[in-house]
């Protein structure tokens, strides 16, 4: 069969053969043919290895195990171990046969059973069969003994409670001569130490001496061909004894003291020209590091590691780096001596070694060596291969951030990283950079000039472009006028149009993503005020984005265009430089958002931001909110850089929060104004008002994608303007937007929504619309929200109107109103005012519902219908 | 401890798998696919260790076969290399200069040998001679059982004639 499968040339052919074989085996199973059972199972195992399903053979294994002959049992157990794993129910059926076989007179059959038990037993089986295994420790045969010892390792892993049963038998195993038994015994002891502290104490008292003697014997033993590997007698036993010593000596001075001599002997005498010897040395060094060794011994260990590091074999260097990570906690100074070699390893061609070395370097960095190390790493960044750059950049950034004593140095290093591997820099990192830049007023000029230079050469690195564009937008005039030149700089001359060129390129480059483009647009707007002569050109660039497929860019371009054209008087204050971004606030936020209590962090942040903003006065802020609001619609990337949007984002985060709850599925305009109303009562500061107003505009625009942009602008801005008592500047702006987008509002005027009724638990909103050409008829969309913590059932809304009005009430969307504002019911009614234009609308309401099966009723009157209905 | 042993050919075909930690069938094939992709693509001069899902995989190539063992992060990698070599030498002794075909056609024998070297993911026997002796003894047991069976069937055949 194997031959047939191997002869298959294609996967399909192979599947065919396997299917046929499986069918034959199934047939044989159902015929219950005992002669070929083991052959079938062998075939099945091969099929299993190829990755085909073979569950139908599981019962066959059990039958074979239950049969009397050795060959059958042998294949049966093999099948058991291969086809089954501990999680299958079938396994429980085998417990009985295992028990019988463990007591069998033939040692090989016992061996098979114990091996199977050791490899696949589950917790229940371990409990059931532990006494049998324990009994086997008494047998004379070393093969059974060692197998029993290893099997008990598995039992202890599965059921740690059983470990005390094995303590004394395990200790007695260490007195054996047979190496196999010794190895198994030592391993069992190690496992016992892990499983219970009691066993650790017991073994520490009783076995330390024995272990030292075993190790002494084995390392001094003359040539023994049976166990010899590369001139060393049984390295496996060496290593296992050393490991157990480590467990025993950890934190225990007495036993460590006892081991010192033999460890020194092993460390000095072991040949290190072969892998086996190195394996022992490696384990020995680890043990020395792990126990309370003398300082002389530690020096010896570190020296061995030094030799390892300079070894040509990659494997050895890898383990050396690995263990140096642990050594650093013990003796940092000694590890520092090998810094140069470790740095070389970062540049190795082997990914595993590079990764280890980089982690080690990261641990090695301290205040004194941070500069040369960073320089080295950044130089390497230029030549490293692509998949490693990501890791490397993250680590460099972390190092630079952690040890940034001087801002100049920090900015310099970050710029280098951005130039080399800007595409691998995470958002948080360049956000942090922007915060630092904005906090270093004396370096603004220098930074913006370096970024400008960098951008000329490498414009393919996304993060670099973003930072550069932000800085040019903010500090454009410093770029032109060469303000704040540092001694180290070469002077450059940049004209205003050069600066605009750079931003334009990054705006139009195909590889730029939306965020970068949006940031470019903002930078352009800012530049238009910084460089009045270029204003017209900038406007042209901006207006080109009017046709952008991305809604976000399109909207920005239209609005910025309007600002440049119509609002020269407020523009300069609009695009004032950003207030300095609070460093501490930024870090707070980072910390807060990390563990996932996002909303809480936001609230805290927002209050911080608000308090930060208010002293700056209104004159400064409008630019920021406006600009940021626009960011927020389309992308969820926070953009502290784009103008501290981050903070505003947070403000809006709150602003947005109430709106879904009150609006629910209701009409968009109603929700918008509702949110506005809600919030106006909360925050009376003008800043927040504009924020919210424009927020509403942008959200509602997003929700109405089918309408053309011009119409959208007009239709949505008008309700806001009606409500605009508190938010004068924004309304002004928006009002003009709607006019200069040359779509005057059409005849059907739009009415603001109202709160028709409000009690402490129930709120009813009305929103209105009129059909064109039929002024008498109004469609009212009513939205009911339940603010209490109880669910209202059998909710019924009734309305009465004066005689001159006709009312048609449609059924509501539901009659169950969820609690705490988690949802709402909407209901549509059509009102015809027969005396339209002469008498105002009025309405009486009656609402009945059940709370906890108790009938409730509320009544109210609506007199505040907008005029003209 | 050793979590699993894999033998993969250079073409990515699995020749032997042994799992000492529970992995479901689905996970197993995923692990195999993942690791064979990583290991087969590594160059000859690189080190024999891969860090993988918090474990380490130690592999070594013998002719066209890759022997892989997955161990805990704090185990001794160099020793595992030595264990792999130990296994290979025993296979070599048993089959007499072992090749991939031996392992394909006598895969069950390879499993028997592995069972004499490792139990529960721990090393059982460091002497090659002992392992070969044990396997030989069990093989002869099988042979005698077979002979007996055939002689019995002969006797039955003769008796029924």
Image: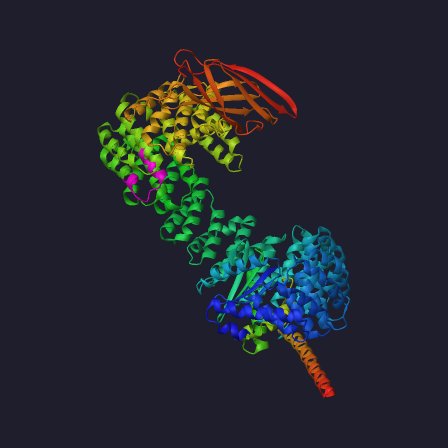
The residue at 56%/71% (across/down) is B88
Residue B105 screen position, x and y as percent: 56, 75
In the image, residue A370 above or below residue B90? above
Residue A140 screen position, x and y as percent: 76, 70
Quarter of the picture holding the C terminus of chain A: top left
In the image, residue A717 above or below residue A480? above
* Camera sees residue A144: yes
| SS majority, magenta | helix
Occupied quadrant, residue A501: top left
The residue segment tinted magenta is: A505-521
In the image, residue A181 above or below residue A647? below
Q: Nearer the viewer, residue A720 or A580?
A: A720
Occupied quadrant, residue B92: bottom right
Quarter of the picture holding the N terminus of chain A: bottom right
The residue at 66%/58% (across/down) is A88
Residue A758 among magenta residues: no
Q: Nearer the viewer, residue A465 or A8?
A: A8
* Camera sees residue B123: no
């Amino acid at each position: 069969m194997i031959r047939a499968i191997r002869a298959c040339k294609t996967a399909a052919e192979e599947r065919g053969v396997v299917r046929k074989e499986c069918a034959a085996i199934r047939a044989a199973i159902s015929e219950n043919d005992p002669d070929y059972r083991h052959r079938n199972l062998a075939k099945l195992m091969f099929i299993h290895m190829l990755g085909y399903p073979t569950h139908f053979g599981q019962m066959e294994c059990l039958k074979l195990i239950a049969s009397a002959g050795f060959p059958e049992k042998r294949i049966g157990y093999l099948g058991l171990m291969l086809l089954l794993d501990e999680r299958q129910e079938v396994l429980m059926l085998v417990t009985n046969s295992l028990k019988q076989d463990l007591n069998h007179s033939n040692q090989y059959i016992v061996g098979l059973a114990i091996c199977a038990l050791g490899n696949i037993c589950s917790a229940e089986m371990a409990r059931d069969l532990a006494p049998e295994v324990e009994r086997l420790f008494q047998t004379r045969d070393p093969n059974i003994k060692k197998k029993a010892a290893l099997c008990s390792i598995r039992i202890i892993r599965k059921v740690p409670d059983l470990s005390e049963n094995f303590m004394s038998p395990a200790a007695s195993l260490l007195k054996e001569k047979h190496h196999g038994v010794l190895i198994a015994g030592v391993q069992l002891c190690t496992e016992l130490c892990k499983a219970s502290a009691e066993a650790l104490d017991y073994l520490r008292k009783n076995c330390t001496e024995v272990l030292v003697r075993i190790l002494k014997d084995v390392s001094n033993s003359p040539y023994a061909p049976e166990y010899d590997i590369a001139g060393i007698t049984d390295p496996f036993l060496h290593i296992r004894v050393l490991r157990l010593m480590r467990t025993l000596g950890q934190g225990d001075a007495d036993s460590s003291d006892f081991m010192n001599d033999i460890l020194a002997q092993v460390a000095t005498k072991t040949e290190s020209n072969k892998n086996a010897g190195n394996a022992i040395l490696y384990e020995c060094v680890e043990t020395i590091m792990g126990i309370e060794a003398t300082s002389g011994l530690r020096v010896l260990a570190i020296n061995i590691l030094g030799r390892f590091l300079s070894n040509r074999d990659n494997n050895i260097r890898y383990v050396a780096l690995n263990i140096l990570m642990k050594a650093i906690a013990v003796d940092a100074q000694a590890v520092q001596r090998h810094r140069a070699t470790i740095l070389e390893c970062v540049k190795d061609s082997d990914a595993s070694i590079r990764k280890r070395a980089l982690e080690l370097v990261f641990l090695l960095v301290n205040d004194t060596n941070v500069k040369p190390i960073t320089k080295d790493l950044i130089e390497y960044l230029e030549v490293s291969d692509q998949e490693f750059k990501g890791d490397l950049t993250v680590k460099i950034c972390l190092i630079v951030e952690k040890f940034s004593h001087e801002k100049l140095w920090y900015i310099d290093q970050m710029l280098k990283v951005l130039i080399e591997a800007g595409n691998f820099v995470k958002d948080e990192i360049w956000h942090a950079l922007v915060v630092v830049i904005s906090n270093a007023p004396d370096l603004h000029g220098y930074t913006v000039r370096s970024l400008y230079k960098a951008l000329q050469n490498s414009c393919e690195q996304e993060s670099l472009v973003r930072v550069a564009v932000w800085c040019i937008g903010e500090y454009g005039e410093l770029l032109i006028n060469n303000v704040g030149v540092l001694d180290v700089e070469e002077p450059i001359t940049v004209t205003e149009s050069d600066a605009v060129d750079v931003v334009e390129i990054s705006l139009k480059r195909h590889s730029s993503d939306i965020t970068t483009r949006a940031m470019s647009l903002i930078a352009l707007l800012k530049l238009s005020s910084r460089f009045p002569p270029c204003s017209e050109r900038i406007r042209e660039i901006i207006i080109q984005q009017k046709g952008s497929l991305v809604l976000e860019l399109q909207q920005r371009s239209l609005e910025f265009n309007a600002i440049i054209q119509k609002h020269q008087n407020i523009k300069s204050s609009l695009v004032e430089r950003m207030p300095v971004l609070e460093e501490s606030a930024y870090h707070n936020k980072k910390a807060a958002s990390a563990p996932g209590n996002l909303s809480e962090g936001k609230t805290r942040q927002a209050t911080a931001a608000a308090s930060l903003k208010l002293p700056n006065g209104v004159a400064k802020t409008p630019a920021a909110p406006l600009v940021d609001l626009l960011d927020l619609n389309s992308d969820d990337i926070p953009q502290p850089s784009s103008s501290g949007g981050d903070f505003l984002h947070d403000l809006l985060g709150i602003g947005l929060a109430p709106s879904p709850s009150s609006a629910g599925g209701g009409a968009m305009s109603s929700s918008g104004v509702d949110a506005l109303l809600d919030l106006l009562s909360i925050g009376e500061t003008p800043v927040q008002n504009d924020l919210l107003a424009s927020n509403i505009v942008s959200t509602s625009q997003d929700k109405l994608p089918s309408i053309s942009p011009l119409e959208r602008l007009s239709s949505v801005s008008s309700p806001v303007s009606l409500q605009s008592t508190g938010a004068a500047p924004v309304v002004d702006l928006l009002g003009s937007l709607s006019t200069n987008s040359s779509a005057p509002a059409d005849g059907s005027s739009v009415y603001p929504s109202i709160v028709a009724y409000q009690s402490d638990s129930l709120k009813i909103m009305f929103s209105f619309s009129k059909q064109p050409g039929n002024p008498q008829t109004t469609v009212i969309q009513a939205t009911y929200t339940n603010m209490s913590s109880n669910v209202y059932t059998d909710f019924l809304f009734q309305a009465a109107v004066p005689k001159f009005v006709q009312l048609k009430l449609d059924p509501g969307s539901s009659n169950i109103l969820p609690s705490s504002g988690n949802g709402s019911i909407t209901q549509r009614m059509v009102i015809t005012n027969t005396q339209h234009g002469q008498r105002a609308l009025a309405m009486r309401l009656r609402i009945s519902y059940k709370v906890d099966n108790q009938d409730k009723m509320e009544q109210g009157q609506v007199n505040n219908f907008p005029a003209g209905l | 401890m050793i979590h699993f042993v894999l033998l993969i050919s250079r073409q990515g075909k699995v020749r032997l798998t042994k799992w000492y930690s529970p992995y479901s069938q689905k996970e197993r094939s995923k692990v195999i696919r993942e690791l064979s992709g990583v290991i087969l693509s590594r160059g000859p001069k690189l080190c024999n260790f891969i860090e993988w899902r918090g474990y380490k995989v130690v592999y070594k190539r013998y002719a066209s076969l890759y022997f892989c063992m997955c161990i805990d992060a704090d185990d001794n990698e160099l020793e595992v290399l030595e264990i792999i070599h130990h296994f290979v030498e025993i296979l070599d002794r048993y089959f007499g200069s072992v090749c991939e075909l031996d392992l394909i056609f006598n895969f069950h024998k390879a499993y028997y040998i592995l069972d004499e070297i490792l139990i529960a993911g721990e090393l059982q026997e460091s002497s090659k001679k002992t392992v070969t002796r044990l396997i030989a003894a069990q093989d002869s047991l099988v042979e005698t059982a077979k002979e007996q069976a055939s002689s019995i069937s002969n006797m039955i055949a003769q008796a029924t004639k």
